[in-house]
Image (cartoon, grey):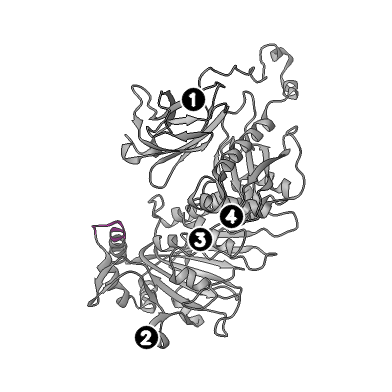
Amino acid sequence: MLAREATQNSLDERFDGSEPVRVRYALHEITDERLRSFLEALRWDEIEPHVEAAASPSNKVGRILERGLADLRENDRLVLLRIDDHNACGLTGPDYDDGRFSAVIRRQLDSRKESPNAGGSYGLGKAVLWATSKLGLVLVNSHLSEPHEGLRGNRMIGRLELPWRRAEGGEWAGPAWFGEPDPERGGATRSWWGDTATARRLHLERTDESPGTSFLIVGAHDPSGEADALEEMHDALVKALANNFWASMVARTSQAPMLEASVVAERDGEVVVPEQRVDPYLFEPTMTRALQAFLDGRTTSELTAKHDVARVDVPLAVPRRKDEDSGSAHSHAAVLLVALADVVGGTPNRLVGMRGNRMVVVEGKIPDMPLGAPPVQAVLLAGRAAGGEGADAAEGFLRAAEPPEHNDWKRTDDLTSTYARGAATRITEFRRAWKEAVHRLIRPTEEAKDDVPPALAGLLDLDAPPARRSPGYPTVNDIDGAVQRDGSWRIQVDVQLPVREDSWVLEPILRFATRSGPKPVVKWLLEPTLNCELAESGALVFSKGARHAGFVGTSDPSSHPVTADMAVVEVELRRTSEVSP
């Protein structure tokens, strides 16, 4: 989560569009004299009472702070994680009023993203920096792209993010800042212009004068608990950068990419894991090859050879914005790229989708692969990532369709409050369109039979099976879902409906699959998305004459027999006579 959110913020603040944003993650475990020198420069004796007062076993944050203090005191060590970006705008603007500095350091839920390609929009990403500190402390050193108070270099500040506490003879409501007193605001803490020696003692020294920001996470840890040792944290960061930003690291031949990223790990000044630059060709060879072919204009209309990259346009209808009285809907052609999976190309039959800055937003398996089809991987480019007519409108539309985690395109409050009625339906139609486009490209061709030895020609038939007659009852045509951060399953279901005069009325049932015995039913909340309405009983009433319909269901974690990530789910459509919407 940290690598995804922090790197997204750096990409959104790219300064010179002809050069990449260079992001460097540096892990450094310090002990003994290095630790004491750092704590002295930090004036830890003034900060420690506040952290200790907030440390409590009664709540999650308090327990993390307890562990952080115990690790520091008992093991006499501290893990620092510095995130440097270069060729970024830096924290410009005043200390308190509107600007990048205030949005990051002072305010909550303020994204202040000015770039139309911006990945973030909720202002939640920066909170991950503080959540990664076991002591709730992040220090900052920024070189500015435009001067503030006539200066640009070494603008420094620290923020201590703690819950309510009693400490130092008073009650404190939340955050505190590490800086210098501002006499014009009653001694409030403001940023200061540091020198190279101070930056070095605080492990915030930047390597050059290019604009950008260094964030130092004090007492860094992996909140997921999956990586503990320094080497494990290094590998986890490299993997996260590759998984989420491989496409941002690919560019047209002879041009610079949007992003370069690297990770290094040290212990008391000695390199433990050498600096590793993330290479997209190493981690995602098939998809990188596909994107490179698109950028260089080398795509084909179909897959006829091993190294072909097939391209097909996928329509996206963007509805009118509610704040545009005279506005109209827009049409946009997203770009779908499909390539045969390389031997070392990772999970086969996988699709990822992205927009402007090419951070991976949508990821999942390609469902219902035709019989005999070779394994493939697919890349969906939309909005400014695809370019063309309606790209700007599509960029804003898909940005509104992303939840705070920016890991899907679906119905959101922002989407329905910003766009005219039918916005969520347009997203459902877009999802169906790209899946159908993949299937059109990967159906086995007649030429595939030429590779079959004559002795086997009569025994092996790679043709797709004949189309089955539509059943006389509704069926689940497609299902796609994932486990959310709160432990729930969120599932998108496409239903195929036989034509009949009356409306179909169905009660969708969600079950946790088991190897044997009954399959437990769990509670879930339904959201109609296409050609159906929710009845008072909880059943779905489908529109008369509709052949396809869709809905989204979110399970209730309290009703799960086991945790969601340990289960496979199934959806059953049960007939019911309830008809009142």
Q: Quadrant of residue 157?
A: bottom left
Inspect the image, locate mark 1, and give the three-letter code of the amino acid beneath it: Trp
Measured from the top left, where is residue 468 in percent x and y?
60, 17
- The residue that disc 1 covers is 504
> Mark 1 to mark 3: distance in Å?
47 Å
Q: Residue under circle 3? A: 6
Compared with 49, 492 (above or below) is: above
Q: Residues within 10 Å of mark 3 (few under 14, many from 20)?
A: many
State whether residue 275 appears in this view.
no
Gap in angstroms between the C-alphas marked 4 and 3: 16 Å
| First of labels 4, 3 by sequence position | 3
| Residue name at image x 43 percent, y 44 percent | 484
Q: Which numbered disc flags the more N-terminal residue, 4 or 2?
A: 2
Q: Is residue 109 visible?
A: yes
User: Which is more toward the observer, 74 or 222?
Assistant: 222
Q: Residues within 10 Å of mark 1 (few under 14, many from 20)?
A: many
Residue on which disc 2 sits: 186
Query: Of the residues tagged 4 and 2, which is closer to the observer?
Result: 2
